Image (cartoon, grey):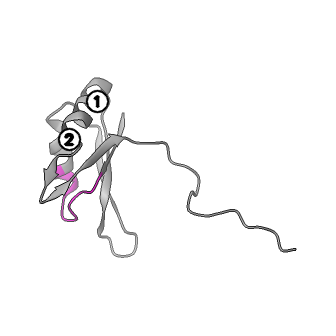
Amino acid sequence: MNIYVGNLPYRFSEAELHTMFEAYGDVSSAKIITDKMSGRSKGFGFVEMPNDDQASEAIENLNGYEINGRSLKVNEARPREDNPRRAPRRPSE
């Protein structure tokens, strides 16, 4: 299961994210999303766990968990849409 983890502290590392979820089972990957220009964390990431039961337990226990005064938002990741930020261009009349 692919899990979205939001509201992460900006200095949180991928290793820390991996370790946090590893307490609930096997973790295939842990990735923190960074800004392309600055390389800084955007404050969210994704964790992949192969066992859905373990992933569900991690979501249940870590959603709302507080780290450095920030309450995590943890849920099953939604599939990515193709360019959701860009509205289709209207032809000129």
Q: Is residue 21 left or right of residue 34?
A: left
Who's the residue at 32% across and 30% down the image?
Answer: 50
Image quarter of residue 23: top left
Q: Amino acid at mark 1?
A: Ser
> Which residues lie in the magenta part?
6-16
Q: Is residue 12 magenta?
A: yes
Tell me if mark 1 has few (under 14), some (14-19) or many (20+) residues whose alpha carbon lies within 10 angstroms of its own.
some
Residue in the foreground of this view, choosing between 27 and 86? 86
Seen in the picture, residue 80 relative to 22 is either above or below; the reply is below
| 78 displayed left or right of 12 | right
Find residue 89 and report its horizontal and vertical position in percent.
73, 67
Q: Earlier in the sequence, mark 1 or mark 2?
A: 1
Q: Secondary structure at mark 1?
A: helix
User: In which quadrant of the rendered view does residue 69 lie?
Assistant: bottom left
Residue 64's label in the rendered image is none
Give the residue number, with chain letter if any, for mark 2.
62
Q: Residues within 10 Å of mark 2 (few under 14, many from 20)?
A: some
Name the residue at the top extreme: 53
Residue identifier under label 1: 56
Q: How many marks?
A: 2
Answer with the quarter of the image where residue 32 lies.
Answer: bottom left
Relative image position of residue 17 (x, y in whole percent): 20, 49
Q: Tell me: residue 31, above or below residue 57.
A: below
Residue at 14% of width from left, 51% of height from top?
66
Location of the N terminus by quadrant is: top left
The reply to whether the magenta stretch includes residue 77 is: no
